[in-house]
Amino acid sequence: MTTIAEPITVPDRAQLVARATELTALLRNNAAEGEKNRRVVEESIQALTDAGLFKLAVPKRYGGYETDMRTMLEVSKAVGYADGGTAWVLTLTNICAWLTGLFPVKAQDEVFGANPDAKVSGVLTPTSTSEKVDGGYKVTGRWYYNSGSWHATWAVLGIPITDENGTVVDQGLALIPTSEMTLEDTWFVAGMRSSGSNCLVADSVFVPAHRVMSVPPAIDGDYPTEQIGSEALYRSAFVPILALVLIGTQLGLGQAALDFVIEKAPKKAISYTFFEKQSDSVAFQLQVAEAAQLLDTANLLAQRAAQDIDDAAAGAEYLDYKARARVRADTGWVAEHVTRAIDILLSAHGAGSFGDTSPLQRIWRDSATAARHAIVSPAVGYEIYGKALLGVEEKITPLV
């Protein structure tokens, strides 16, 4: 297993977003089938792979693009514009590639050195047990909501780290090949159906010590990769990037809803009124403007947060606690206001929004489901930020 020594030409942000946009028709055409089968259609996965869109957070040493937070956000938005479930799988796979890039190079070699196109899924919650053994740990556990599980060859999973006496002394993340685990088909939900967020099961799987990373130091920016001095992306703030990346899909869904409603407005009447075209109604115009403003401000806030993460990483600085708390709040604010914009657009468009043939109903379900991800929760994010602003020392979560 060796790294790739030759430098590669990395597409810039605009080029990568353009590649994603070019796939819009294909991804939309496959969306209904993906939802029906509760997994992204393989044709869509292959198209994203061929376009290099799973390489955004893979180190250049392995032929990856090693981009930045802003690029991941914009590409996720572009794919989300086509289909929410597909974008969610792409986003989670890319951010788990980023997590893999934090591990020691020996572990990275086993993942990307062996297969530069390896796809990594992940669940941070340590719903497992571990036993310290010679050279590593034996891990047993069940990890739910493992998005992209059908397509992953590796997974980064939360585990308790124990000592020789079996006492939990730390919390960690373990890199485990999916071939050493089983997959339970448990993802039966209202939205994001094609994300395939199933349950991974491990039964006494051996994980060598170099494939286990301690989480508390990582939260403060202390990562085990030996390449941190030369690779800015893997200096990004741990919790902010893990949280913010999740709202790229939301931004794409919101824009797709807005564009659809605007496109249909000159052709659709408002029932039980004299308006033959929705676009002639001042009430409708106000609703569209409000939704557009909500989406615009959501985009601006997300872009600012992404730029702050990237600027700090590029400058070899780590975001301070207050800045990290603000990104948690920003993440929740964006999700909340995209959800509100979509709700306004559903009402403006009318009851037809919920027809099986309308893309709005899937946009609504996908967005509403993704917005409830635990780390996105607006109320939690606002409380974290409010406490930070007021200097309240009480913590409600270590994930800041």
Image (cartoon, helix red, strand yellow):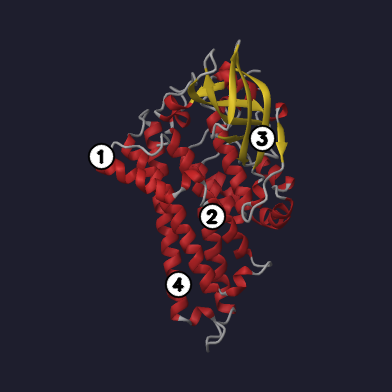
User: Could you tell which of marks 4 and 1 lies nearer the N-terminus?
Assistant: 4
Residue 371, how many percent across, how many down?
A: 51, 52
For mark 2, give the secondary structure: helix
235 left or right, relative to 59? left
Residue 391 — which label?
Answer: 1
Q: Who is closer to the viewer here, 393 or 9?
A: 393
Asked if residue 329 can be seen in this view, the reply is yes
Identify the residue position indicated by label 3 in the image.
Answer: 200
Q: Give me the residue at 55% from left, 21% from top.
A: 212
Q: Report how far apart the C-alphas of labels 1 and 3 lie in the structure.
A: 40 Å
Q: Is residue 199 above or below residue 298?
A: above
x then y, percent, for residue 327: 39, 43
Indicate the quadrant containing the C terminus: top left, top right, bottom left or bottom right.
top left
Q: Which residue is mark 2?
A: 252
Mark 3 or 4, nearer chain start = 3
Of labels 2 and 1, the one closer to you: 1
- Check disc 4 and report the residue beneath it: 287
Separation (CA) of disc 3 from disc 4: 43 Å
x 31%, y 46%: residue:
386
For residue 17, side relative to residue 188 (left or right): left
Name the N-terminal-most of marks 2 and 3: 3
Earlier-in-chain disc, 2 versus 4: 2
Q: Is residue 21 left or right of residue 391?
A: right
